[in-house]
Amino acid sequence: MKLLMIYMNRFSYNPTIKTIDSMPDFSEGEEYESVQTAFIQVEKEDEEKESEVKKKLLKNLKWIAGKNNTKHIILHSFAHLSESKADPEFSKALFDNIDERLTNSGFTVEQTPFGYFLDLNVQAPGFSLARVFKEF
């Protein structure tokens, strides 16, 4: 798994092109303020170590949200951090599981539309833990 975590003062998106036909249709965008975003690349080898990957992902997201003093996390599928890509259904199920577990831990969690290219608008501050990359 590749994980790029960026704290953002402002994050918004608009769906542009649907890339996975089996995913729900989205036409409206969203906008958020003071959020921890997680750009996540689920890799093929993650399918074999699902429990370990979920544990590390949760740990990293809770840690960085705490460091950046927010309880609002955006999960964004970003299949551009690696050549290796997990099955889309596996990836979406992983996202949904992480969403549920974070929500049960008191976080507000959003997911960008899965299976879409999105127009992104970001405003990210420049401080030490505003941008963190992890690989596991």
Image (cartoon, rainbow, N blue to C red):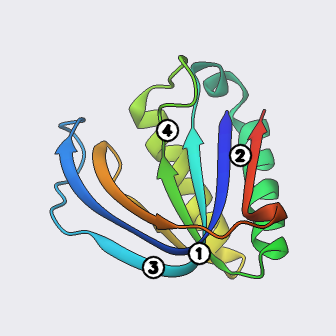
Q: Earlier in the sequence, mark 4 or mark 3?
A: 3
Could you say whether the residue bearing mark 4 is in a helix, strand or loop? helix
Q: Earlier in the sequence, mark 2 or mark 3?
A: 3
Q: Are marks 2 and 4 in contact (CB under 8 Å)?
A: no
Amino acid at the residue labelled 2: Lys
Could you say whether the residue bearing mark 1 is in a helix, strand or loop? strand
Q: Position of residue 104 (x, y in %)?
A: 66, 75
Number of the front mark, 2 or 3: 3
Could you say whether the residue bearing mark 3 is in a helix, strand or loop? strand
Q: Does 128 sit above or below residue 86?
A: below
State how far apart marks 3 and 1 are (Cα).
7 Å
Where is mark 2, residue-wise? 54
**Which mark, residue 35?**
1
Tell me the residue at 84%/72% (across/down).
Answer: 67
Q: Does 82 sit above or below residue 33?
A: above
Q: Few, some or many C-alpha atoms within 10 Å of disc 4 (few <14, some 14-19, many ≥20)?
A: many
Amino acid at the residue labelled 1: Val
Number of the front mark, 4 or 3: 3
> Residue 7 vs residue 58: left or right?
left
Q: Are marks 3 and 1 in contact (CB under 8 Å)?
A: yes
**Which mark, residue 32?**
3
Q: Are marks 4 and 1 in contact (CB under 8 Å)?
A: no
Number of the front mark, 2 or 1: 1
